[in-house]
Image (cartoon, helix red, strand yellow):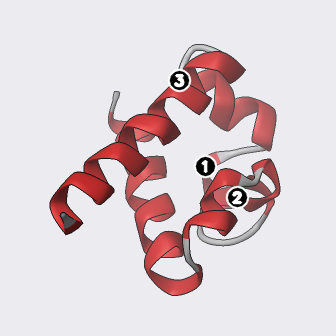
Amino acid sequence: GDQARAVLEALLQKYADNGIASVESMDILKVDPLRVHGTPMEIVGLFGGREDYLAAIHELETALYEKAA
């Protein structure tokens, strides 16, 4: 939904600022601007659970690399 999209947009900003390693870490969910969306567990819940969250991150990475190629 809209909240999950906002989380992905915040992750994109973190990627732009700090690179892909920061986005792949679950610790990223504990810092601004991501923590405004809830606790790490709440944020992961927006995606339907940990596996779905990680799948969304993987899709985001794939899309970024395809655009760069």
Percent position (x, y) of residue 12?
41, 64
Helix, strand or loop at label 1? It is helix
Write the residue at 79% across / 31% down: 41
Residue tagged by mark 2?
35
Q: Is residue 14 depicted above or below 1 in this figure?
A: below
Where does the N terminus fall, quadrant-wise?
A: top left
User: Within the image, what quadrant is residue 54 found in?
Assistant: top right
Give the amino acid type for the residue marked by disc 1 in the picture.
His
Mark-to-mark CA distance, 1 and 3: 12 Å
Q: Earlier in the sequence, mark 1 or mark 3?
A: 1
Where does the C terminus fall, quadrant-wise?
A: bottom left
Helix, strand or loop at label 3? It is loop
Q: Which mark is residue 23?
A: none
Viewer-nearest of discs 2 and 3: 3
Residue tagged by mark 1?
37
Q: Contact, CB < 8 Å: mark 1 with mark 2?
A: yes
Write the residue at 75% across / 54% down: 25
Mark-to-mark CA distance, 2 and 3: 15 Å
Percent position (x, y) of residue 31?
75, 68
Tag 1: Cα neighbours inside 10 Å, few (<14), some, or many (≥20)? some
User: Within the image, what quadrant is residue 32 found in?
Assistant: bottom right
Write the residue at 51% across / 85% down: 17
Give the amino acid type for the residue marked by disc 3 in the picture.
Phe
Residue tagged by mark 3?
47
